[in-house]
Amino acid sequence: SDGERTKAMRLCHAMYEAVEEGKGRSVTISNLGAHFKVQKVKKDPFFASQRLLDLVQRHLDVFDLVPDGVHDGGWAVAIKAGVGLASQDLGVAAGEFESSLLPARIEEPGDLEEKCQAFRIECIHALFKRGSKVQLNELGQDPHVTKRRAAIGGASRKLLDLVNHFPQNFSLEDQGHGNFTIELVSTEVTDTSMLPGVAAQAQAETAGQRKFEGKGKGKGKGKGGPQMSPMMKGGPGWWGAGAYAPGPDWYGGGHGPAWDDEWGMEDAMNAFMTWYMAGK
């Protein structure tokens, strides 16, 4: 498939760069497998049951296998003579080929499910552009990702929770202290079975956020609640029937029941507590 061919080309490019660092010397299979670029690509589950030697043998148009001179039956890898120039273009070719396999952007997504799919695709494009692996917060700063994220809940939905809906596309690594890296593992987006669930959750969370904001907007702002108004005015209504009502001097400092604008809430409450404790 196109996806498997892309992965094979990426591994071939990684192996080429690893051998090239030997500056003309062959590299043993074990050292080749230990190279960080090869390890990064080979982490893909697609290569899990495949030996590196077998993978090298699939690219004998690029590599030569020679005895390593260390172990009986051991092999070392060298770049085939005369293919250096073509192999230098291998990375470009692989990159262009991969780019052609990126899913098409959804410029004007319609319903909520399509908006979730648009977010998924933008994350794929953003990761590909950044070399496939970045810090999660860096992905969240991409303007295209930010735009699509806003359409499905915005800042009220954690980026971590959103990308976790697409494990076939993204791999997350917890680095501790709330830090994560995210890696692109597949550009395939034909499986949309998860989208109804993602959309339903987005709709529920957005509705809950709006309900919460509606309750808080303009309700008792600066008024201290319905019971505070009589108290602020020093009126008797807030004491209740039969309650011990304060005398005119509990305000202290010559302040009477008529509320003084120079007096703040903290002063009033301190004075009230002084009176209250004295009357108990």
Image: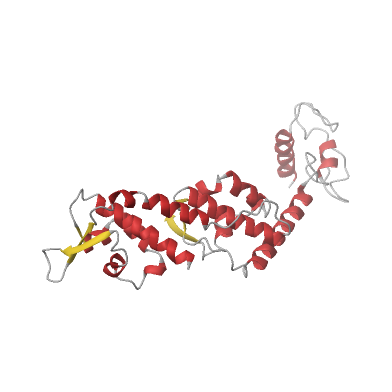
Q: Nearer the viewer, residue 231 or 138?
A: 138
User: Within the image, what quadrant is residue 4 found in?
Assistant: bottom left
Question: Is residue 176 at all visible to an observer of this figure?
Answer: no
Q: Nearer the viewer, residue 221 or 259?
A: 221
Colour logic: secondary structure
Q: Nearer the viewer, residue 38 or 153?
A: 38
For the image shown, how many numbered marks are present on the structure?
0
- Answer with left or right where residue 158 lies relative to residue 203: left
Residue 36 on image: x %, y %:
31, 55
Residue projecting furthest to the bottom:
49
Q: Residue at x 54, y 56 (%)?
A: 102
Residue 251 on image: x %, y %:
77, 33
Question: Is residue 126 at all visible to an observer of this figure?
Answer: yes
Rendered view: 68 above or below 270: below
Q: Residue at x 12, y 71 (%)?
A: 72
Residue 97 on image: x %, y %:
47, 55
- Answer with left or right where residue 115 lies relative to residue 248: left
Rendered view: 263 above or below 11: above
User: Within the image, what quadrant is residue 34 found in?
Assistant: bottom left
Q: Residue at x 24, y 49 (%)?
A: 21
User: Within the image, what quadrant is residue 164 found in?
Assistant: bottom right
Q: Nearer the viewer, residue 184 or 241?
A: 184
Residue projecting furthest to the front:
82
